[in-house]
Amino acid sequence: MRLLFVKDFLDLIFPRNCELCTRALFDYEFCLCTICEGKLPITSYHLRATDNDLKDKLQGLTRVSRVLAFLKFTKNGKTQRLLHQLKYRNKPQVGYYLGKKYGQLLLKQDYSKSWDCIVPVPLHRMKLKRRGYNQSEEFAKGLAESLGIQIENILERIVATETQTKKSRLERMGNVEEVFQLKSSISVQNRNILLVDDVITTGATLCSSANVLLANGAKNVDLATIAAGGKI
C-alpha cells in the first residue's frame, strides 16, 4: 500500500507523459502512448534490406549488404520530433524504446541470426561528455535486448567533426574521412556486424564507420538507423 502511495506521489510530482502528444501515460506504456505508437511511420525497409533506395544511395561509397531504417523521416513530422527529444532534450529512453520496438519487428523476420554483434556509431568524447550519452548506443541497447545480440563499442571517433546539418553530400563525405578507427587490440575478423546510428541522410558517417570495420576484416556489415527519408 505504501509503495502505491509513493508511486502515486511521484507520478504527481514527476508525471510521465507521451513524448509526442503529452498525454499522461498508463503504467504499461513506456514513453509513447498506445495511440501515438500506433501512428508511428514505420517503413518496410526490413522486407527489402538488400534492394532499396537507401542502399542505392550508398553505391560506390561502401560495401554493405543490407540497409535498414525503422521510421520514415519527414520535416516537422513525428519522427523528427522524437529525434529532437532524443538528441537535444535529454531523453535517452526514446532511443532505447525505438530500438526495442524495431528489434521486435526484426525478430519476426529472423534477423537475430544475421549478426554477431551490434556496433553503435560513436560520438567524440567531448560531445559525449556534453550530452551525457550516445543516442546511437541507446538505440543499440533496445535492439540488443529484443534480438538477444550483444553490443560492442569497438569504434572510436578520433576527430571532432563540424556539424553535418547544412553540408552537401560531398562536404559530408569529406567531413568524416578518417575520423573513426577501431579500438586497439580489437579484432573484427570474419564477424557479421550490425552498425547502427540515429539517422541516415547522405550516409557519410555510416559509410565511413562501415569502411573501417570492413578494412579490418569484418566479414559483413549491415546498417540500421532509427530514421531515414526515402521511398519506403
Image: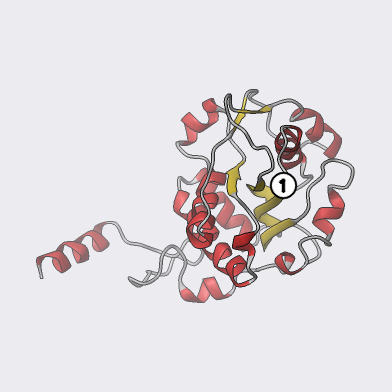
**Residue 63 in the image: above or below residue 208:** below
Give neighbour class at mark 1: few <14, some 14-19, many 20+ (Cα, 10 Å). Answer: many
In the picture as drawn, the residue positioned furthest to the right comes out as 60
* Colour scheme: secondary structure
Q: Position of residue 8 (x, y in %)?
A: 21, 66
Q: Nearer the viewer, residue 81 or 195?
A: 195
Q: Position of residue 163 (x, y in %)?
A: 68, 33
Q: Position of residue 62 (x, y in %)?
A: 82, 42
**Residue 60 in the image: above or below residue 71:** above
Check the picture and name the quadrant holding the C terminus.
bottom right
In the picture as drawn, the residue positioned furthest to the front comes out as 190
Per the image, label 1 sits on a secondary structure element best described as strand
Residue placed at 78% from the left, 66% from the top? 48
Residue placed at 45% from the left, 36% from the top? 132
Where is residue 80, by image quadrant? Answer: bottom right
Residue placed at 76% from the left, 40% from the top? 207
Q: Which residue is mark 1?
A: 221
- Amino acid found under the numbered disc labelled 1: Val
Q: Is residue 165 visible?
A: no
**Residue 24 in the image: above or below residue 82:** below
Where is residue 191, by image quadrant? Answer: top right
Q: Is residue 81 visible?
A: yes
Q: Nearer the viewer, residue 48 or 10?
A: 48
Q: Position of residue 154 (x, y in %)?
A: 58, 35
Where is residue 63, by image quadrant? Answer: top right
Query: Relative to residue 49, is residue 56 drawn left or right?
Result: right
Query: Relative to residue 29, is residue 232 drawn left or right?
Result: right
Residue placed at 53% from the left, 27% from the top? 125
